[in-house]
Image: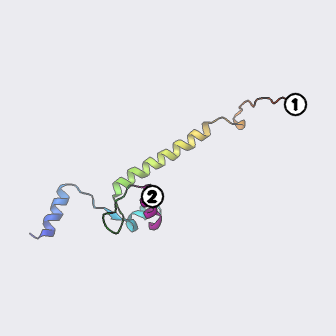
Amino acid sequence: MTAKTVTSELINSLNFEQPVNSRTAAPLLGLHYKTLERMARNGDVPAARPGREWLFRVSVLSVWFDKELHANVSDSTNLSEQKSPENNEEIPEQNPKG
């Protein structure tokens, strides 16, 4: 058995998910890889940079994306529930001066 085989077997036995770089991860989110790298640099998306390139776990990105999607849907729902003149909100009468 070679060292590479032992390492592969160990990784498989631990259910270790191999990280992917930004060029692989970005299309999964519909982003350009530079945009994903900028988001990682700003701390907007979960990532690690142990060397020169950003690394991502697809499963973590999936959870992050679901949370972002849910947050955006919640924000849209909250905005539509706010009262406005179009929603028959009473507008206080103004007393003319004079």
Labelled pair 2, 1 in contact (Cβ < 8 Å): no
Q: Quadrant of the N terminus?
A: bottom left
Amino acid type, label 1: Lys
Q: Which mark is residue 42?
A: 2
* Position of residue 66 in the picture relative to residue 91 (left or right): left
The magenta stretch is 32-45
Most extreme residue toward the front, as rendered?
A: 98
Q: Which mark is residue 97?
A: 1
Q: Position of residue 90 (x, y in %)?
A: 73, 29
* Position of residue 29 in the picture relative to residue 82 (left or right): left
Q: Position of residue 97 (x, y in %)?
A: 87, 31
Instruction: Write the residue at 47% across / 45% down.
Output: 70
Q: Position of residue 21 (x, y in %)?
A: 35, 66
User: Whole-Å distance between the Cαs marked 2 and 1?
Assistant: 52 Å
Amino acid type, label 2: Asn
Q: Does 42 appear in magenta?
A: yes
Image quarter of residue 54: bottom left
